[in-house]
């Protein structure tokens, strides 16, 4: 029972006047913006009211009832309204019990304003002031790409010409566009908003399932296990087939393992027998040819003034090169601690940290700024939350967490908080249902990607589904 109800005598409402001060400027509650700034009166049964005034009063009373149902009182954003001359006149005309009720309500305004309204909380959630270590604060959003189950899904996949597994997910630098490619030979571009996630365009490649894709300024480069690759113009919708200029033993080079250099007009592509080629995106010419001592299984770029290329493969060795259009130098090569094969590598945007995944499920964390590179690299942290080959590593753009996954087992994906020292803390609440013993419903995770602003996380699986989450903290604090 409210303070007002406690102060009222036991008398029927119809025998007098009951005054409510409900004026409030700019209340955030839905439906309360049009509430009048003057006092509303519920007259006795013998009073006559104008039809317009009666309609306004009924509407306002409905709003008050709604606020009461949600456990709040209409107030002035934490302060009571100053009493005006009209208020004093109405107080003089009102009976003593009504004036007392009005005073009690005014005095209680400051107290009630400090209490959170359930309706207000739902309408405007309080932004998270900081990230919690070992906890993933995020909201599940509409799937970027959903699939049908059972026989219908199998038939649709067969009709598209292949399997439906997601093989690549890439965001545009503005975080509004996302490209999803799969082994069904389709590449789709979506407008990301978390609500509609409208598909803008879809392209079917007859002879190439896309394995790697990335955005340029106005185009998407799409590569696969072929000697050629494609470029999709986002403005015109035109598709260009680009013939490769790299040949190995008379055969065109496969572009299955490739990665673009950040903010540079060239990309790296892995060849056979330990070779890696640096290819210009402008002239299509080979700028550099690198030879390592084992078959290359993965590669990535580290950001910085001069991009650094990281190459990993069989034997557990990792190579770091400094690359420019006219110069190539080996900075270091080291053996990843405890690795028989390096199956995945990824670096942070600022280029200070490197993640190296092994076939045992271990992910070692290395500091790779200029002063720490050496032949005897020692990990500053070890992520031990997977049991099979690490196939995906996706560092968050802010560097505060990283997503890791293996496509060998269902639901084998984790998000790990990273301390500045490199110490990892596995998030205990993701995947959903992790601590409830139920199905986590991720399937076999084949691709993961964060948006450049840090807000969106997309997770693709072997059935073609791309699930999406919105990170609460970065909704209010996007990465610049």
Image (spheres, helix red, strand yellow):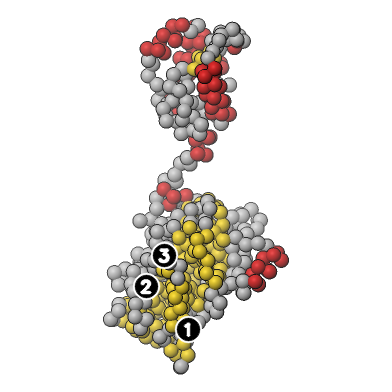
The span from disc 2 to disc 1 (Cα, nearest Å) is 20 Å
Residue drawn where x is 43% and y is 52% of the image: 474
Where disc 2 sits, the SS reads loop
Q: Quadrant of residue 221?
A: bottom left
- Residue 356 is drawn in which quadrant? bottom left
Real-space Cα distance between discs 1 and 3? 26 Å
Q: Residues within 10 Å of mark 1 (few under 14, many from 20)?
A: some
Query: Of the residues tagged 1 and 3, which is closer to the observer?
Result: 3
Q: Is residue 19 above or below residue 207?
A: above
Tell me: residue 108, above or below residue 196: above
State which quadrant residue 463 falls in: bottom right
- SS assignment at label 3: loop
* Residue located beneath label 1 in the image: 227
Query: Do the numbered discs 2 and 1 sit on residues whose CB atoms are within 8 Å?
Result: no
The residue shown at (34%, 74%) is 265
Image position, residue 136 (x, y; %): 50, 54
The label number, if any, that marks residue 235 in the structure image: 3
Question: Along the polypeptide, which appears first: circle 2 or circle 3?
Answer: 3
* Residue 176 drawn at (x, y percent): 44, 57
Q: Check disc 2 and report the residue beneath it.
A: 261
């Amino acid at each position: 029972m409210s303070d007002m109800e406690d102060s009222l005598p036991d008398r029927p409402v119809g025998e007098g006047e009951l005054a409510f001060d409900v004026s409030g400027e700019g209340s955030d509650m839905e439906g309360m913006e049009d509430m009048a700034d003057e006092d509303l009166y519920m007259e006795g049964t013998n009073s006559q009211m104008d039809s317009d005034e009666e309609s306004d009063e009924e509407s306002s009373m409905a709003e008050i009832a709604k606020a009461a149902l949600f456990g709040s009182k209409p107030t002035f954003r934490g302060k009571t309204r100053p009493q005006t001359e009209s208020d004093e006149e109405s107080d003089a005309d009102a009976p003593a019990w009504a004036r007392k009720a009005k005073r009690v309500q005014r005095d209680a305004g400051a107290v009630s304003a400090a209490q959170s309204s359930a309706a207000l909380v739902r309408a405007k959630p309080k932004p998270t002031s900081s990230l919690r270590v070992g906890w993933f604060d995020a909201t599940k959003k509409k799937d970027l790409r959903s699939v049908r189950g059972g026989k219908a899904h199998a038939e649709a996949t067969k009709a598209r010409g292949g399997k439906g597994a997601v093989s690549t997910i890439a965001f545009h630098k503005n975080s509004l566009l996302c490209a999803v490619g799969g082994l069904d030979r389709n590449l789709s571009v979506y407008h990301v908003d978390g609500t509609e996630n409208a598909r803008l365009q879809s392209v079917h490649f007859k002879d190439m399932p896309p394995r790697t894709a990335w955005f340029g300024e106005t185009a998407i480069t799409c590569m696969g296990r072929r000697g050629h690759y494609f470029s999709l113009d986002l403005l015109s919708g035109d598709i260009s087939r680009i013939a490769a200029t790299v040949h190995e033993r008379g055969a065109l080079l496969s572009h299955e393992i490739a990665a673009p250099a950040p903010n540079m007009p060239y990309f790296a592509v892995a060849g056979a027998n330990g070779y890696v080629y640096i290819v210009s995106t402008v002239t299509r010419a080979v700028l550099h040819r690198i030879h390592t001592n084992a078959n290359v299984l993965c590669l990535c770029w580290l950001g910085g003034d001069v991009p650094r290329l990281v190459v990993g493969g069989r034997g557990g060795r990792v190579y770091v090169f400094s690359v420019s259009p006219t110069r190539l130098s080996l900075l270091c090569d080291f053996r990843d601690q405890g690795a028989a094969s390096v199956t995945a590598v990824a670096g942070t945007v600022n280029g200070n940290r490197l993640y190296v995944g092994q076939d045992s499920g271990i992910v070692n964390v290395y500091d790779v700024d200029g002063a720490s590179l050496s032949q005897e690299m020692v990990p500053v942290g070890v992520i031990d939350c997977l049991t099979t080959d690490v196939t995906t590593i996706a560092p968050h753009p802010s560097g505060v967490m990283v997503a890791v996954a293996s496509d060998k087992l269902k639901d084998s994906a984790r998000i790990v908080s990273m301390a500045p020292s490199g110490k990892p803390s596995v998030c205990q609440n993701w995947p959903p249902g992790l601590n409830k013993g139920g199905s986590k419903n991720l399937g076999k995770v084949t691709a993961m990607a964060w948006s450049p602003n840090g807000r969106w996380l997309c997770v693709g699986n072997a059935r073609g589904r791309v699930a999406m989450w919105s990170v609460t903290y970065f909704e209010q604090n996007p990465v610049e």
